[in-house]
Image (cartoon, grey):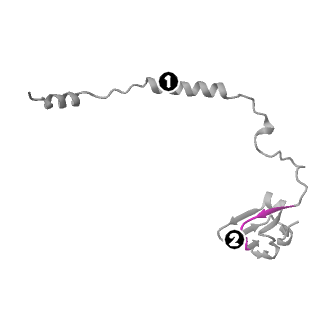
Amino acid sequence: MAIDTRAYKNKLRSKQARISLVPLIDVIFTILIFLMVTSSFQAVSDSAGGKPDVSDTSGTSEYYLIPMSGLNTVTVNGVDMSSYIRNSAIAVHTNVIDQGEITIKPKEGLITIITPEGMSPEEAVSTQQ
């Protein structure tokens, strides 16, 4: 008795796989229900945004420390102020931060500062306080 393999191969080729989406939808709804039940919904207050509360009176310091790993050179308006570097950091005046321009190049170990008009390089930077 011969087995008809050709008919069996044709039968296999003619059948297409059917993909049922019902189990996928069941899993998605189960995850959705789990997340809804275990989550707690609360109103977010303004102070809990993760940002610091900054106001005009929050800082009393005239100079703020800018640390940089491997800091070698600090130039202010083209003047080398590298002698003010302490522990790979330099203190910069608040007016420079607000109104001037600070360029930091960490790969070169360089900070370039352009001060606002009327501020001297000696006034723009300081040693650590």
**Image-based side of 115 in relation to 7, left or right:** right
Where 63 falls versus 51 (above or below)? below
Count of all numbered marks drawn on residues in the image = 2
Residue drawn at the location 88% of the way across and 60% of the way down: 62
**Image-based side of 21 in relation to 4, left or right:** right
Quarter containing the N terminus = top left
**Image-based side of 4 in relation to 92, left or right:** left
User: Which residue range is magenta in the image?
Assistant: 63-72
Q: Which residue is mark 2?
A: 109
Q: Residue furthest left?
A: 1
Q: Residues within 10 Å of mark 1 (few under 14, many from 20)?
A: few
Residue 119 in the image, given as x and y percentages of width and height: 84, 67
User: Is residue 64 covered in magenta?
Assistant: yes
**Residue 73 numbered mark, or none:** none
Residue 78 in the image, given as x and y percentages of width and height: 74, 74
User: Is residue 5 covered in magenta?
Assistant: no
Q: Which residue is mark 1?
A: 26
Q: Earlier in the sequence, mark 2 or mark 1?
A: 1
Marks 2/1: CA–CA distance: 57 Å
Q: Is residue 18 visible?
A: yes
Q: Secondary structure at mark 2?
A: loop
Where 59 falls versus 114 (above or below)? above
Residue drawn at the location 80% of the way across and 72% of the way down: 85
Q: Nearer the viewer, residue 39 or 88?
A: 39
**Closer to the eye: label 2 or 1:** 1
